[in-house]
Image (cartoon, rainbow, N blue to C red):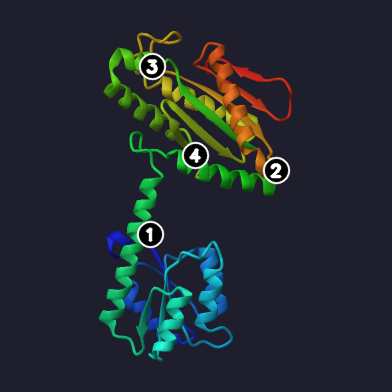
Amino acid sequence: MNQNNKGLSILIVDDDKTNRRILKELVEGMAVVLLAKNGAQAIEKSTELKPDLIILDIVMPDMDGFAVIDTLKNNRETHDIPIIFITANNCFEMEEKGLRLGAVDFIAKPFHGGVVQARVNTHLQSVAHKKLLDQLAHIDALTTIANRRQFDEVLHKEWQYAYRNRTEFTLAVVDIDYFKSYNDTYGHLVGDKALRSVALALQSQLVRPRDFVGRLGGEEFVIVLPETDVRGAEVSLHNCLNAVRELDIPHENSQCEACVTVSIGSYTCIPENMTDMLNALNFADQSLYLAKDNGRNQLYSQNYKQDSKLVLLNAN
């Protein structure tokens, strides 16, 4: 498989078994190949598996390729998947209709192996390039972890999941203690290095696939812990506090430790509606303020189950 296409997938849709086999043999070295034998199966697999490219036959029983592409293009989850039509009918009207519906290319039957491979490769390269640009747009250039844009997307998705499934959700804000004095003492280049180290230390403690850490800006980070109650959050966030302290980065002008430390404020809840996301972030921010007000280098957590707040000092 082309290394540039690693992780990409192609869905081949054709009611003819021989055509599916031929196309599979032609492109299987270029990406992971998925197969569908009719329009209904194509829509189901496209929605579930989100292939990176679809090769779609026009003439099929029950639901033809035009009906399939019309359905996919009107679904937000599949709208952006590029589709190549294949057909034995090469009239301009068919091609025009397919392009107007959103197809990116046409391949004629009978297949010419080199042409099929060249066209498929062109579109796979375009997909790979777009994915790379999208990935870079979601990464903080200094720390290499997620940026604010990605956080906004993750927060919306996970909040929606927690609201729909009535699961607990924890949001935490992290701030490096006395970071301005650190930069004043050691310089901004050393400060940048410390930011990167702290970011990676936080990330190293979030081991579940959906756990998330991103940089909000400056010396502030945010952590999202889906399906996590207050006790589970305390364990993870304690680990984050300790991981940063164990970096043992000297900070001679810190007023709480001789090394770089962080303060964390967290809020745990079961979302009651979709409009409370910003309130949750505000509660986490309030907790962070209280952690700093209480001496820093600690976690201050709030949760929806009780009016009183739980203060955890110094994560030891």
Identity of the residue drawn at 41% across and 10% down: 254
Marks 1/3: CA–CA distance: 42 Å
On the image, the x and y values in percent for residue 208 come to 51, 41
Disc 4/disc 3 C-alpha distance (Å)? 26 Å
The quadrant where residue 167 appears: top right
Residue 130: give x, y in percent of width and height: 36, 57
Left of 230 or right of it: where is 152?
A: left
| Label 1 Cα neighbours within 10 Å, binned few <14 / some 14-19 / many ≥20 | few
Quadrant assignment, res 17: bottom left
Task: Tell me how many marks there are.
Answer: 4
Q: Dot 3 surroundings within 10 Å: few (below 14), some, or many (20 or more)? A: some
74 or 257, which lies in front?
74
Can residue 210 be seen in this snapshot? no
Q: Helix, strand or loop at disc 2? A: loop
Residue designated by label 2: 273
Name the residue carrying label 3. Answer: 180
Judge whether 3 appears above or below 22 on screen. above
Tell me the amino acid under the disc marked 1: Gly
Amino acid type for the residue under numbered disc 2? Asn
Label 1 belongs to which residue? 7
Q: Nearer the viewer, mark 1 or mark 3?
A: 3
Residue 216 in the figure: left or right of residue 113: right
Residue placed at 59% from the left, 28% from the top? Answer: 284
Which residue lies under the disc numbered 4?
212
Q: Nearer the viewer, mark 1 or mark 2?
A: 2
Amino acid type at circle 3 is Lys
Q: Quadrant of residue 286?
A: top right
Q: Is residue 157 rendered to the left or right of residue 31?
A: right
Q: Mark 3 and mark 2: span between their CA atoms?
A: 38 Å
Identity of the amino acid at label 4?
Phe
> What is the CA distance from the residue labelled 4 to the residue labelled 1?
22 Å
**Mark 4: few, some, or many residues within 10 Å (few <14, many ≥20)?**
many
